Image (cartoon, rainbow, N blue to C red):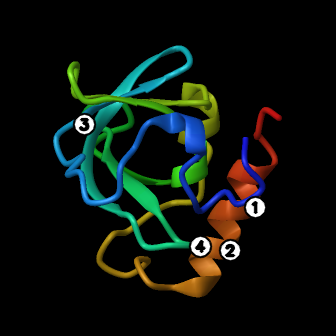
Amino acid sequence: MSENIWGYQPTAGHTAGVDLIGYKVEATDGSIGKVDKHSDEVGSSYLVVDTGVWIFGRHVLLPAGTVRRVDPEEKKVYVDLDKEQIKSAPEFDKDSHLGNPEFFETTGEHYGRHRRI
């Protein structure tokens, strides 16, 4: 993975400005939900994933650096994390955590521990 967990990997195939809302999100061990929101902001790109019933309707924040591949034909985003790594992420509330630098730092540290280099 790239050094910046908050930026898309050059090999991910994502083009800034492409709307990912509604894309299915695939962990290394299965589907985790759909993209509810995303940002292409340089240095703080992310996906907000609605996990549906998988973890009781919880939303999770995934740094763009965890995205392995975007497939626009299948409308899927593949991430380099398994379900347990995502499930154990810091609790996310999209109404209060977006734009909160401390939450982004904590989340980045969590996923940074699970990076596959």
Instruction: Report the mark closest to the observer, 3 or 1.
Output: 1
Q: Earlier in the sequence, mark 4 or mark 1?
A: 4
User: Within 10 angstroms of label 3, few (less than 14), some, or many (20 or more) residues?
Assistant: few
Dividing the picture into quadrants, the one containing residue 88 is top right
- Per the rendering, the mark at residue 105 is 2
Check disc 3 and report the residue beneath it: 52
Check disc 1 and report the residue beneath it: 109
Calculate the distance from the C-alpha at mark 3 to the C-alpha at mark 1: 25 Å
SS label for mark 3: loop
SS label for mark 2: helix
- Per the rendering, the mark at residue 104 is 4
Instruction: Report the mark closest to the observer, 2 or 3.
Output: 2
Amino acid carrying label 2: it is Glu
Amino acid carrying label 4: it is Phe
Question: Badges 4 and 3: C-beta atoms under 8 Å apart?
Answer: no
Q: Earlier in the sequence, mark 4 or mark 3?
A: 3
User: Within 10 angstroms of label 2, few (less than 14), some, or many (20 or more) residues?
Assistant: few
